[in-house]
Amino acid sequence: MQPSNEGNNPIPQGKYLPASRFGNIIYTAGMTPRRNGELIQSGKVVAAEPVSTYYAAVRQAAANALAAAINALTEGEELTQILSLTVYVNAEETFQSHSSLANAASEYLSEQLGEAGIGSRAAVGVSSLPGNAPVEIQLVAGVSL
C-alpha cells in the first residue's frame, strides 16, 4: 500500500524542483518543516531542550520529503524503498543527539512505508539552515517500474 501525500505539496522556496528523477531513482530536495509554505518551528536545536521538542518539525520535514517523492511517481508506480535519508540539524555547538532526531524521521518513514521506509541514513549537524529551520531532510528513493 502506497501512502498518500497527506495533502502535502511542498512549495519550492527558490528555483528548484521538490524532487527529480533518473530512471527508477527519485532524489528530493532538502525539505524544511514547512506547512503551506510556512515553517512550523524555527531556530537552533538546543541541547538543554528535550529532543522531543523538535519531533513535530522533523516529522513535518520528513512528510514534505516523502510527499515530494510521491508526487514524482506516475500512475501505477510506487516507492519500493527509501535508499538514503539525510537529516541536517541546525544545532547549537553543544548539541549531540543528532541521531535521536534522525530516528524520528526514520520512525515516520517506517510508519508510512513499513520496512521499505528504512534505508541508509546520515545525521549531520550544521551551523545554519534556510529560514533558520531547525532541521532539513533529503531522501533518495527507489521506484517500482
Image (spheres, rainbow, N blue to C red):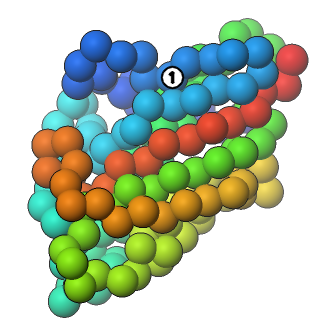
Q: Classify residue 119 as left or right of residue 54.
A: right
Q: Classify residue 75 as left or right of residue 129.
A: right
Most foreground residue, 8 or 96? 96
Q: Classify residue 127 as left or right of residue 82.
A: left
Residue 25 visible, this angle: yes
Q: Which residue is mark 1?
A: 19
Give the x, y percent position of residue 95.
28, 81
| Picture layout, residue 32 above or below residue 97 | above
Question: Which residue occupies 84% across, 25% down?
Answer: 144
In the image as oriented, which residue stretches furthest toward the top? Answer: 75
Give the x, y percent position of residue 113.
71, 48
Residue 57 visible, this angle: no
Q: Dividing the image into 4 quarters, which one contains the N terminus?
A: top right
Q: Amino acid at mark 1?
A: Ala
Question: Which residue occupies 58% across, 51% down?
Answer: 85
Q: Residues within 10 Å of mark 1 (few under 14, many from 20)?
A: many
Q: Dividing the image into 4 quarters, which one contains the C terminus?
A: top right
Most foreground residue, 86 or 115? 86
Q: Secondary structure at mark 1?
A: strand
Numbered-mark total: 1
| Picture layout, residue 123 above or below residue 48 | above
Question: Which residue occupies 51% across, 52% down?
Answer: 86
In the image as oriented, which residue stretches furthest toward the right? Answer: 145
Which quarter of the picture shows residue 8? top left
Give the x, y percent position of residue 123.
48, 64
Question: Which residue occupies 42% across, 16% down?
Answer: 17
